[in-house]
Every structure is written in structure tokens, then in C-alpha cells.
Image (tube, coloured by chain):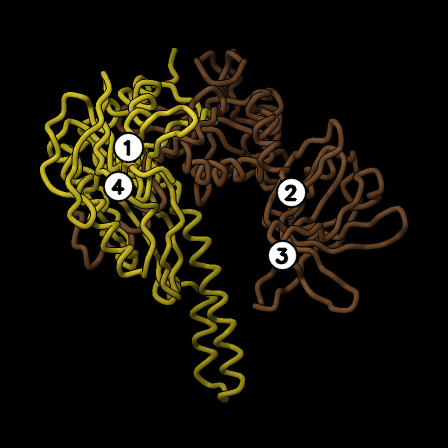
């Protein structure tokens, strides 16, 4: 790898205030500027960050601190993910800064459009899960099986318990299929965009109804909170996690063109 | 309800987001899919998304350039014949029945010429057959080691040999194999009687309502024999639309802007509001929906 590279944290509009804090391991921050957008970077002297998990966690958090800082000072921010490094090109005789600047120039229209779209927004994450033990406790099949269990000898009990668990899981999963469209529609009405994700940590004995990253107008976060409160009141056995607000991490992807958008379909 | 930023509760989530999301750039690798520049490392995330689209056999709707790019990236380890194209690909396993009897995991690729079970790393083609040599393809249900019911496929070849495979969405793979091969659905199988295949299933756009208005989203709609209509985007975890036959009060078609070449969209009045759908195949859907006895009497046909 050529000597000097640039580690990139975020893209911000060109007229944004200079970054205040420091980056990973206290690295001083500066920007690479094009006409429309700037990249917040530090001068890097080695390859990607690698090391024990604990170190990676610390680096990732320091990375996210820079993004948070940009988010609170600039009008909008496109977070860049961890370990994105621009390097120079020996063939073209270009430095890392040259390369990065030419990308910012080329992609300037797309990037500033996306920055404008995301201005004033926040990402929140909503995870709604049901406990397979609590949720279906009033289901007739479950009640029957639970009652049957009481009088059985231990060996038979174990078999029946297995069956009970399977039925509980099926009943809860079917309920989740029913609840998902309703919850999704109610949350979508309070969001600019919604994106399902596969939850990384799903505790045993639970069924996920909905795990979604929500792009919300920062001024209207409380509306999403209110909707979740009413969902919680209607279904007390639902477990709701409501995380954020964060910079719009999940919504910076430049559309791959596989879905097209239109404002209200009415002509 | 107030959102929490407490690092103790959110750290794993934040780490996951930061490692998987965000604008990624790698100046060595700026590629273009559908004329929109995608940047560098992002390729990995994008491929994951595209593979999901492929699992749903949605590739045919893409333009030439996108398809060519996807074909190249998909088939890097999988030599294709002239003019052969991947139609669908999904996680699958192949039941090896020689020295060891075991399920071997990989991916199933349905091309315009073959059905292939391939493992990427280390690269090995576990099984393959020319579509021409397939005489029958059937779905059956088997309990897996864990006790869950799994849908599997039994493929019979001209030489009489039978192969068993499992796939992420066996039912969908089967329908694509049949479509590709022009195989008839099995005439009658007692286990199928209760849960016969869907009445109609295909690509569909659904107008989802957000705070700022509606957004057309691509996905797949299915109408079961019992009249349950569902729509699911390959990007979502569950079906976003679920209309039981008794919730559907009227069906009409109206001229509205939509992402298909057709000028009309399908308006479904339901007990919980109006749903707008768009399909290149609208008339078939209208027929299938009107055909259902519980709604037939109330149908008002739009102009």
C-alpha cells in the first residue's frame, strides 16, 4: 500500500463547520473538500484496523463519536462505515487526497442529493418480540397441553413439553404473521422510510414480530414513541426495544435501482 | 415511549450497524448497477440484497446491464454454457446417498438449462442435472433432525434416479423449475389435497404509506386457494400485506400512476382501508380475486 492513506469517517455538505474532536486513537481530523461535499478524514499510515474484539469495539465507537459530532454540527451527514480507507494510485500518480477528491467531484451530485434528503432526520430502531411462553398462554391447544402435562409421569412429560414448546412457537409465529402488517403500517405512517433487518441477537424463547430501522424526521420522534406506547398498551406481553436516535446509518445506501419511488400514486 | 441511547443496552446494535451499514467507498472499485454508482466495499452488502432478489426470481425484470453484471458476479465459480442464464439462486442442500448419507449444504442455482447444487467455498458442484433430463419434480415434507417440518424436493430424472434436495423456499424453487421445464404439477398427491399450491403468485408492486406519502415497493403477491392474499418484499422479514377473504369488500381497477407499463392500478377495499397494487399482469389478478366466492357478489368492476 502506498505510504499515506486517508481514513474516512463521514461525508458532510461543503459549507459545514470543521470537525472539532479527534478520531480513532486520538488522530487529528481534517477535511478533503470538493465544490459540493467534504469528507471528514484523518491521515492514516497503515492498512485497515485489525485486532482483538475489544480493540475493534473501541475503534468502532471512536469512529461513531466522530459521526455523531458531525451530525450535531453539520446540517446533514452521510456516515461512512468502519475501516473505509482511500489510497493513492501509483499508476495515475495521484495521492490519496487526489483520489478522494476526484470521487467527491464525480459523486458530488448524488452525495449532496442524499445529504439533502437526510437533513434533519434520525435513525431509530424498533424491535418487537413476543415470548413464546407468555404470549400464547390462552390459546386453547396450549392450555390443553399444559393441563395434560400436570398428571403425566416424568418421561411422558418431557415428550409433551417438547410438543408444547413446538405448539407455543407455532402459535406465536402465526400471531406474528398477523401482527406484522398492522405494526408495520402504523410505524410507517410515522416514518420517512422503514427497513427491516435481521436481528443479530434473538434470545431463545422469543419470536420476532418486527425489527426495523426507522428513518424519522428528528422533530417527530415522539410521534413514533407514542405509537409504540399504544402498541405496548394493546399487547402487554409484547417486548419492545426502542433505540436511538442515531445518525441515519441505515439509510445512506445509494439506491441500487431495484425499487422505484413515487410520491403518492394518485395522478 | 422514549428511545434509549444507553450504551449498555445499545452497544451490540450500534456495532452491528457501524460494521454493516453506511456509505462505503473504495476507489479501486466503483461499479455501476442500473446506472447508479455503487461504491466499493458496499458491493458486499449490495450483493446480499441482489441475491435476495434473485431468490425470488425477480431478475427478469431488470435491465440488460444489471443482469449481465449479476450473471458475471454470480457465476464466477460456476461455468455457464453459451446463452445460459441464472434464473434463481437460493440456499439449499443436497442429500448425498453413497458412502455417507448426509445433507450437504450449498446453493441451488436454477439456470435456463440446468438445476445445479453448488458449494462455493471450497468450490464443488454437489449435483447437477439438465432440465431436459428432469421427468418429475415433487414437493414433500419431512421432519428434520431438530423436529421441524421441512419442505423438500424430490427430482426424478430420465434414467429413473431420484435426488432429494432441500431449499430455502422449496415451494418457490419448484414452481420455477416447473415453469422452466414446462412440467405439469403432479396430478394428485393425497398430502397435497389440504394445502395445494397458490392459486396465483407473481411479481407485484405495493403502495406503502409513509409519513410523507406513498412509496411503490416491489415484491411478490400470492393468492392462496383459500383466498388469502399476501404481499411480501424480499427485503422484509414477513408479509406486509395480509388480506383474508372476509376482509376484502371490493375490487376495482383505476388509472393511477404506477411503476409498471400499465396505466391502471388495482384498488382493494378492505375492512382496514384501501390497498393499491400494481402488476404487469393485472387482468389475471382481477380474475383470480373476483373468482373467489366470498367476494364475487360484491365486486364492483372499475372502468
Q: Which of B189 and A120 is in front in this view?
A: A120
Closer to the eye: label 2 or 3: 2
Query: Where in the figure is residue A171, as x and y percent of width and height?
Result: 46, 59
Q: Is mark 3 on a helix, strand or loop?
A: strand
Task: Look at mark 1 in the image and give the residue it sits on.
Answer: A189
Residue pictured at 71% horizontal, 50% vertical: B125
Considering only vertical position in the picture, is B145 above or below B107? below
In the rendered structure, find residue B105 and report the number of the disc placed on it.
3
Query: Where in the figure is residue B12, as x and y percent of width and height?
Result: 28, 55
Figure quadrant of the C terminus of chain A = top left
Q: How far apart are marks 1 and 4 (CA)?
A: 44 Å
Q: How far apart are marks 2 and 1 (CA)?
A: 44 Å
Q: Which residue lies furthest to the bottom in this view?
A: A153
Closer to the eye: label 2 or 1: 2
Query: Where in the figure is residue B288, as x and y percent of width and height?
Result: 61, 29
Q: Nearer the viewer, residue B5 or A11?
A: A11
Task: Look at mark 4 in the image and give the residue it sits on.
Answer: A44
- Letter of the chain that mark 4 sits on in the rendering: A
Q: Earlier along the polypeptide chain: callout 1 or callout 4?
A: 4
The answer to whether residue B274 is left or right of residue B226 is left
Callout count: 4
Considering only vertical position in the picture, is A28 above or below B16? above
**Mark 2 surroundings: few (<14), some (14-19) or many (≥20) residues within 10 A:** some
Question: Share a chain, discs 3 and 4?
Answer: no
Q: What element carries label 2?
A: loop
Tell me if I can see residue B128 in this picture: yes
Question: Share a chain, discs 2 and 3?
Answer: yes
Task: Look at mark 2 in the image and give the residue it sits on.
Answer: B77
Query: Where in the figure is residue A252, as x and y percent of width and height?
Result: 31, 32
Q: Quadrant of residue B58?
A: top right
Amino acid at each position: 500500500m502506498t505510504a499515506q492513506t486517508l481514513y474516512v469517517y463521514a461525508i458532510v455538505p461543503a459549507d459545514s463547520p470543521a470537525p472539532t474532536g479527534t478520531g480513532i486513537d486520538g488522530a487529528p481530523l481534517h477535511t478533503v473538500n470538493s465544490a459540493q461535499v467534504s469528507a471528514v478524514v484523518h491521515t492514516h499510515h497503515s492498512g485497515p484496523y485489525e485486532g482483538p474484539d475489544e480493540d475493534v469495539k473501541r475503534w468502532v465507537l471512536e469512529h461513531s463519536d466522530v459521526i455523531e459530532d458531525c451530525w450535531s454540527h453539520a446540517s446533514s451527514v452521510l456516515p461512512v462505515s468502519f475501516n473505509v480507507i482511500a489510497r493513492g494510485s501509483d499508476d495515475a500518480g495521484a495521492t490519496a487526497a487526489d483520489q478522494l477528491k476526484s470521487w467527491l467531484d464525480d459523486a458530488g451530485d448524488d452525495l449532496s442529493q442524499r445529504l439533502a434528503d437526510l437533513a434533519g432526520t434520525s435513525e431509530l430502531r424498533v424491535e418487537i418480540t413476543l415470548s413464546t411462553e407468555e404470549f400464547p398462554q390462552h390459546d386453547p391447544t396450549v392450555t390443553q397441553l399444559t393441563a395434560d402435562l400436570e398428571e403425566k409421569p416424568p418421561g411422558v412429560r418431557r415428550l409433551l413439553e417438547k410438543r408444547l414448546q413446538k405448539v407455543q412457537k407455532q402459535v406465536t409465529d402465526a400471531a406474528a404473521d398477523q401482527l406484522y402488517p398492522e405494526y408495520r403500517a402504523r410505524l410507517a405512517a410515522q416514518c420517512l422510510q422503514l427497513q427491516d433487518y435481521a436481528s443479530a441477537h434473538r434470545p431463545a424463547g422469543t419470536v420476532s414480530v418486527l425489527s426495523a430501522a426507522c428513518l424519522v424526521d428528528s422533530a417527530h420522534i415522539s410521534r413514533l414513541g407514542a405509537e409504540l406506547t399504544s402498541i405496548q398498551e394493546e399487547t402487554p406481553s409484547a417486548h419492545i426495544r426502542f433505540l436511538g436516535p442515531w445518525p441515519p446509518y441505515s439509510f445512506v445506501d445509494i439506491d441500487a435501482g431495484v425499487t422505484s419511488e413515487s410520491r403518492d400514486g394518485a395522478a | 415511549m422514549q428511545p434509549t441511547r444507553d450504551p449498555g443496552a445499545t452497544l451490540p446494535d450500534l456495532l452491528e450497524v457501524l460494521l454493516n451499514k453506511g456509505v462505503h467507498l473504495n476507489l479501486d472499485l466503483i461499479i455501476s448497477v442500473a446506472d447508479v454508482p455503487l461504491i466499493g466495499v458496499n458491493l458486499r452488502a449490495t450483493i446480499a440484497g441482489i441475491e435476495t432478489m434473485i431468490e425470488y426470481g425477480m431478475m427478469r425484470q431488470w435491465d440488460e446491464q444489471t443482469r449481465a453484471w449479476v450473471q458475471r458476479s454470480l457465476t464466477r465459480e460456476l461455468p455457464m454454457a453459451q446463452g445460459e442464464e441464472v434464473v434463481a439462486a437460493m440456499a439449499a442442500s443436497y442429500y448425498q446417498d453413497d458412502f455417507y448419507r448426509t445433507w450437504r449444504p450449498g446453493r441451488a442455482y436454477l439456470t435456463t438449462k440446468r438445476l445445479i447444487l453448488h458449494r462455493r467455498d471450497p468450490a464443488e458442484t454437489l449435483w447437477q442435472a439438465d432440465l431436459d433430463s428432469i421427468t418429475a419434480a415433487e414437493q414433500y415434507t419431512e421432519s428434520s433432525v431438530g423436529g421441524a417440518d421441512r419442505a423438500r424436493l424430490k427430482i426424478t430424472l430420465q434414467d429413473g434416479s431420484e435426488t432429494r434436495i432441500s431449499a430455502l423456499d422449496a415451494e418457490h424453487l419448484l414452481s420455477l423449475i416447473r415453469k422452466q421445464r414446462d412440467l405439469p404439477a403432479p396430478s394428485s398427491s393425497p398430502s397435497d389435497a389440504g394445502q395445494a399450491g397458490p392459486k396465483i403468485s407473481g411479481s407485484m408492486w405495493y403502495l406503502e404509506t409513509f409519513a410523507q406519502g406513498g412509496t411503490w415497493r416491489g415484491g411478490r403477491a400470492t393468492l392462496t386457494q383459500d383466498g388469502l392474499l399476501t404481499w411480501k418484499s424480499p427485503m422484509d422479514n414477513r408479509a406486509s400485506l395480509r388480506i383474508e377473504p372476509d376482509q376484502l369488500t371490493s375490487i376495482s381497477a383505476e388509472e393511477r400512476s404506477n411503476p409498471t407499463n400499465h396505466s391502471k392500478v388495482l384498488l382493494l377495499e378492505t375492512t382496514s382501508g384501501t390497498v393499491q397494487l400494481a402488476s404487469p399482469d393485472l387482468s389475471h389478478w382481477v380474475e383470480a380475486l373476483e373468482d373467489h366466492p366470498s367476494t364475487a357478489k360484491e365486486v364492483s368492476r372499475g372502468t
